[in-house]
Image: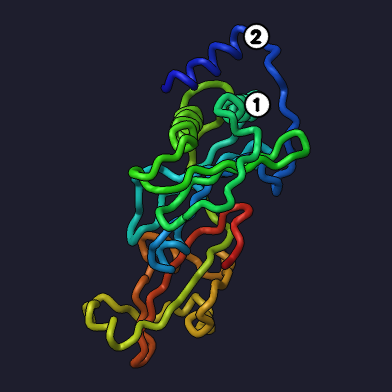
Amino acid sequence: MTAALSAVLIGAAAACGSPTAFDHPTGSDERVLVVGSIAGLVTPENDFMGLPRVTIMGDGTAIFTREGAYLQDGIEVVDQRTLSADGMQQALRIASSAGLLETRDLSGYDDDGGATVVHVWVDDEQFTNGAYGSDDEPDRNRDRIREFVADLDAFLRSDGDQLGPITAYQPEEYDVLARQIDEQSLASFEPQDFVEWPDQIPRDLIDAGVCSRVDAHDVGDALDADNLPVLIADGDTRYLVAVRPVLPGVACR
């Protein structure tokens, strides 16, 4: 627990149960807080598979990736749990303590080195803050964003009456992006790494070349991480396939 998180918790306790209450969206399809990222200079497939680190919905559903935990081929492990009303307020107090209930002008920043971007919807406003640049490029906002992310992550993984049990996130849909591998690039892959296109997945996905969204029920376990075919053979044509679970508010792009 960082000093900032300790201060938030102590301050809330000192307020004798009457800390500032934040008015936030309450719908299951309304976002309250999102910690996302801009990948920077990476392959289209890696950019596509990048997921928001934290998404908190109005009904208290918190969906978050497990830092440093991957299933295979860059697919992040995603957990979820439910926050009580007090838990929602606590998450917003952490954001407020970090100075994130204000919007920072992000224009003019170079995102080639990647960025962390935080969105908060509270009191009928949306606040956006970000930390841009690499470690050798000074950015006074970076430290407070990093500390906020660490504090929020620690809270979401803590014990207490404000949080329900942690369970694995079960997506209702998947996004799929298939790209044909050109002859020059094909030499870097081993022939035995390719598998036939699974019958459960619509074949038109491999020809689209753009993000396509499929219902999890329709594809069964064909896109589960343990079974996920990343390299597809379709006759003499080879494809590289990127897949990600659909999280609330993430557009198919």
Identify the residue position indicated by label 1 in the image.
89
In the displayed structure, would residue 131 be above or below residue 228? above
Identify the amino acid type marked 1.
Gln
Q: Quadrant of the N terminus?
A: top left
Q: Residue furthest right?
A: 124
Q: Quadrant of the C terminus?
A: bottom right
Quadrant in the picture for residue 217: bottom right
Residue drawn 52% across the image and 21% down it: 160
Identify the amino acid type marked 2.
Ala
Q: How many marks can you see?
A: 2
How many other residues sit within 10 Å of disc 2, few (<14), some (14-19) or many (≥20)?
A: few
Residue drawn 66% across the image and 45% down it: 31
Q: Residue furthest bottom?
A: 236
How far apart, in angstroms, are the residues tagged by discs 1 and 2? 13 Å
Identify the residue position indicated by label 2 in the image.
15
Which of pointers 1 and 2 lies earlier in the amino acid sequence? 2
Q: Nearer the viewer, residue 112 or 126?
A: 112
Quadrant in the picture for residue 122: top right
Residue drawn 58% across the image and 12% down it: 11
Task: Indicate the secondary structure of the residue bearing disc 1.
Answer: helix
Q: Residue 22: where, in percent of width, then height?
A: 72, 27
Q: Nearer the viewer, residue 234 or 108?
A: 108
Task: Indicate the secondary structure of the residue bearing disc 2.
Answer: loop
Q: Residue 143: where, in percent of width, then height?
A: 44, 33
Would residue 104 be seen by someone viewing this image from the given angle? yes
Q: Residue 219: where, in percent of width, then height?
A: 52, 70
Q: Is residue 246 left or right of residue 189?
A: right
How many other residues sit within 10 Å of disc 1, few (<14), some (14-19) or many (≥20)?
A: some
Q: Nearer the viewer, residue 115 or 198?
A: 115
Determine contact: label 1, label 2, CB under 8 Å.
no
Residue drawn 37% across the image and 71% down it: 229
